[in-house]
Amino acid sequence: MSIMEIIGSFLVIVGSIFLFLGALGIYRMPDLYSRLQAGTKATTLGAMSVILGVGFWEPDWFLKLLVLVVFIGYSNPLSSHAMARAMFKKKIFPWTKEGGVDAYKEVIEPTGEKQES
Amino acid sequence: MNSQPTHLQPLSTQTKVSRFLMNWLLLTIVWIGFTGTFDLHELLTGIVVAGILSFMAIRIFTCCDLALLAPKKLFYLGKFIVVFLVALVKSNFDMARRVLSPALPINPGVVKFKSQLKSNFAKMVLANAITLTPGTLSIDVIDDTFYIHWIDVKSADPEVAFKEIAEDFENLLIKIF
């Protein structure tokens, strides 16, 4: 095995571990938003790492894969943000502990004067 | 909210040309990345296609103009990418720690803070960066107020939250955009 293959395998393994942890996080977290958090972060780094690992195996593809990594890096948080916002607009509010803060609830359901947006 | 969406506001010729050239450059780089070759024919096709596309998309691709190529800004852009990658790795370990510990140490909530960033693109980059940093997920941006879902709320005070979550990124982004 060459050095490149070792680095590639290492990155792929690390990526798969993070993807697994993301799945576990989706299973264990209490509400949609926390699940989304676990999902987003783990899939971003996991997918990036796996793709880069493949890039080390096949150096010819490296530039292409780099473009893909950049694309994942900004499309993944965008999609999770869109989902979180859509859930809030549907009035699904996050689970909080006793006395937790929820600053966005006031925007969706104004308590005092009615806001128009 | 502005009366007109950003992509409908009138632009000066200078902005247009500058933006067009920058988009051309970026698209050409993406083309080279995808074809993976510096062969003359491929390169020429790419340059022509990228030119046509960026001409058509002057009002849509509003991210950056030639000012971004100043060495100082490029330096801060590089620094931003490094800070961002470190935060991304940290956030994954943070998440792994929370997920794997049996007690599930979370205290979720939504906090808000104000940002000083002006341009829409800079706000988008900040929101994306926040989503990928430890324990935070941006939910909405209304004008200059960011609403952030925080998995371990340390303080509901906007200023403290801003310091904890966004200060590093914002300081760099102000210098870039």
Image (spheres, helix red, strand yellow):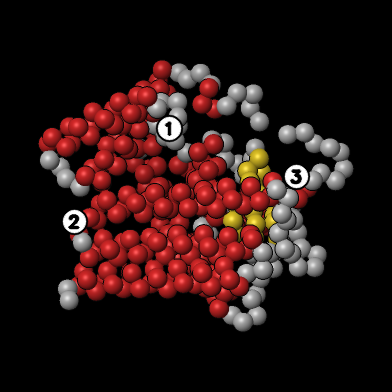
Q: Amino acid at mark 2?
A: Asp
Disc 3: which chain?
A: A
Q: Amino acid at mark 3?
A: Val
Q: Quadrant of the N terminus of chain A?
A: bottom left
Question: Helix, strand, or loop for circle 1?
Answer: loop
Q: Work out how far the residue at label 1 is from the one at label 3, CA to CA, in angstroms.
A: 30 Å
Q: Is residue B117 left or right of residue A18?
A: right
Residue B118 position, x and y percent, is 57, 36
Determine which residue is flagged by label 2.
Answer: A60
Residue drawn at (45%, 42%), measured in percent from left and top?
B176
Residue drawn at (33%, 69%), measured in percent from left and top?
A11
Q: Residues within 10 Å of mark 2 (few under 14, many from 20)?
A: few
Determine which residue is flagged by label 1.
Answer: B61
Q: Work out how far the residue at label 3 is from the one at label 2, CA to CA, in angstroms.
A: 50 Å
Quarter of image, res B44: top left
Residue A114 position, x and y percent, is 84, 37
Question: Helix, strand, or loop for circle 3?
Answer: helix
Determine which residue is flagged by label 3.
Answer: A107
Q: Quadrant of the C terminus of chain A?
A: top right
- Camera-nearest residue between B65 and A7: A7
Q: Work out how far the residue at label 2 is from the one at label 1, CA to CA, in angstroms.
A: 30 Å
